Image: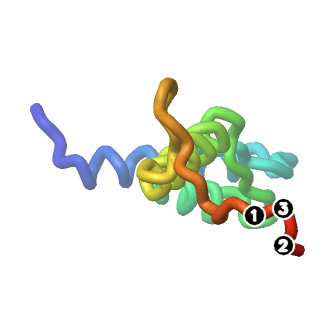
Amino acid sequence: MRFPRTTIARSRRQHLAAWLTEHPSVAIVARDRSGLYADGAATGAPQALQVADRLHLILNLSAAIERVLEERSRELLLPGKRVRKVFPRRRMNEK
């Protein structure tokens, strides 16, 4: 039998909330970016601080770096290319 995706998501959220309710000493929940885990953690352990785990911090950082590099790709220099002069050359007697 196949379950709709929303049913599976709802059951994961409820399972996490139930587990956290059974373990009230949980103070910090390290999770991914998924909204269903955020909801489950907030329901099961409203006192707990929710933080991103290392993997997802690195994923967020790499996505941000990739966006910046894509935006600035025309400004990057390729190896072997001559550098275009940005400032005009000064003459010796100019200040």
Task: Report the residue marked by disc 3.
Answer: 92
- Outermost residue on the front side: it is 93
At 64% across and 64% down in the image, what residue appears? 88
Task: Report the residue marked by disc 2.
Answer: 94
Q: Quadrant of the C terminus?
A: bottom right
60 and 70: which is toward the camera: 70
What SS does tag 1 mark? loop
Q: Is there any visible trace of residue 50 in the rendered image? A: yes
| Direction from residue 71 to residue 68 in the image, left or right | right
7 and 52: which is toward the camera: 52
Cβ–Cβ below 8 Å for labels 3 and 2? yes
Give the number of the disc on residue 90: 1
- Outermost residue on the bottom side: it is 95
Q: Amino acid at mark 3?
A: Met
Above or below, comparing residue 89 to residue 28 in the picture: below
Rendering coords of residue 42 (x, y %)? 64, 63
Mark 3 and mark 1: Cα distance apart in space:
6 Å
Local packing at callout 3 (Cα closer than 10 Å; few below 14, some 14-19, many 20+) is few
What SS does tag 2 mark? loop
- Outermost residue on the left side: it is 1
35 and 83: which is toward the camera: 83
